[in-house]
Amino acid sequence: MKRLLAAWCFLVVFSSVQVHAQTGLELVCSEVVAGEGVTAVRPLSDFFPGLRGTPFDTPVFVMGDGARGTEGAEAPPCAAIVAGTHANEIAGVLASYWIIERCRVPEGRLVVVPRVNASGATWSLQDASGPRFLELGSRTIRYGTRLSNPAQERLADPGSFVPPQASGNFPALAGQEARNLNRQYPGRQDGNRTAQTAYALTLMLQAEEVRIALDLHEASMTSSLVWSMITRPEHLDAAALAALDIEDETGVSFHLEDSRDEFAGYSHWEWGKLGISAFLVETPNPAQPTDDPTIEQLHNAAAPLAKRVYVHLCAAKALIANAADLLQDAGALRIEGFPSSVEEVGRWLEGTL
């Protein structure tokens, strides 16, 4: 299986060069290698063909039992982990890479989308023609920016922007927010590429029968969002139980926030309308909000990268376990291979594990 997936990535890289300078498929396959726990890899464009051949197409990694049940049989429960909504929020991307490379799902299913807005990873605030990079051992990771690359969009930014399902009195946002994936859910098939990406991701969650979904983010050190979990009111119990588990394991105290109408377009609000237990997780990023290129990420004294990645992974483990326990009709969902310490994640980041 691992050899077949590696061959798939080779074909993606080769074919994408012919179709486009760089698709998200090529980008992700240059950064992560599917481990033995991955049972299938599909392009997001399988769910919405309008993304095919564009920088917005990105891989969806399926782990565990890929079958969704035979006729009349209960489908195994499925969770989703989404990262890279904002390509400068790098800890979530790396946490999803750990899962793809090192985790296994012996019961149930898990889908992982490590760079859901791959376009955002192709440019930076300092260089409109290219991203910054993080060198992690022998691995080179793109450090992009918050919004989709304007040069890769199919439509120009509007004068102002309102999320697709916002209420009539929702205050208009700046036009560039049309390129913020976390304002575009549930997406539009006739919108810009960012809206189409949200639409494709929404279709994927429905097609894969996802019951629990996490969206991994980072915030500036002074933001009130640091060390927070945001979810709809009906899922706060699962978040509260997870916060206790995370504090026991990491020493980090998460605070909870309930999503509401003013979060129109956000993942946790819109996915929740589909009946999904959806959670947004925030860790700190010392380079934000300006993406200061002089800030050292790996060994940053205030917020070392290994700790941020480790906490994201502990949050994923705790949220999925507690949310699954509260789904009365769910079958077994078990994920193995999470790290046991910050030091273990640090060795992996440095390429010595």
Image (spheres, rainbow, N blue to C red):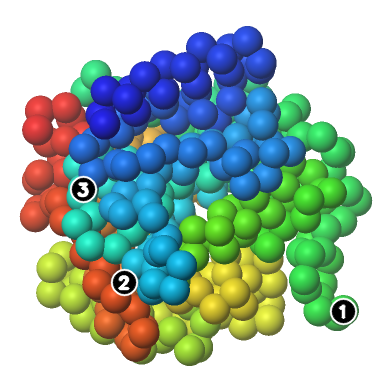
The amino acid marked with disc number 1 is: Gly
Q: Which mark is residue 168?
A: 1
> Circle 3: is it few (<14), some (14-19), or many (20+) Cα within 10 Å?
many
Quick one: label 2 or label 1, which is nearer the N terminus?
A: 1
Q: Quadrant of the C terminus?
A: top left
Query: Where 325 sits versus 42, above or below?
Result: below
Q: Residues within 10 Å of mark 1 (few under 14, many from 20)?
A: few
- Residue 8 relative to residue 202: left or right: left
Secondary element at tag 1: loop
CA distance for labels 3 and 2: 16 Å
Residue 229 point in image, percent of width and height = 41, 72
Residue 33 position by quadrant: top left
SS assignment at label 3: loop
Q: Which one is in front, 82 or 266?
A: 82
Query: Could you give the CA–CA distance between mark 1 and mark 3, rounded to whole angstroms?
Result: 44 Å
Check contact, mark 1 vs mark 3: CB within 8 A: no
Seen in the image, is 304 located left or right of residue 117? left
Relative placement, left or right, of 109 versus 138 is: right
Query: In the image, which disc is placed on residue 319?
Result: 2
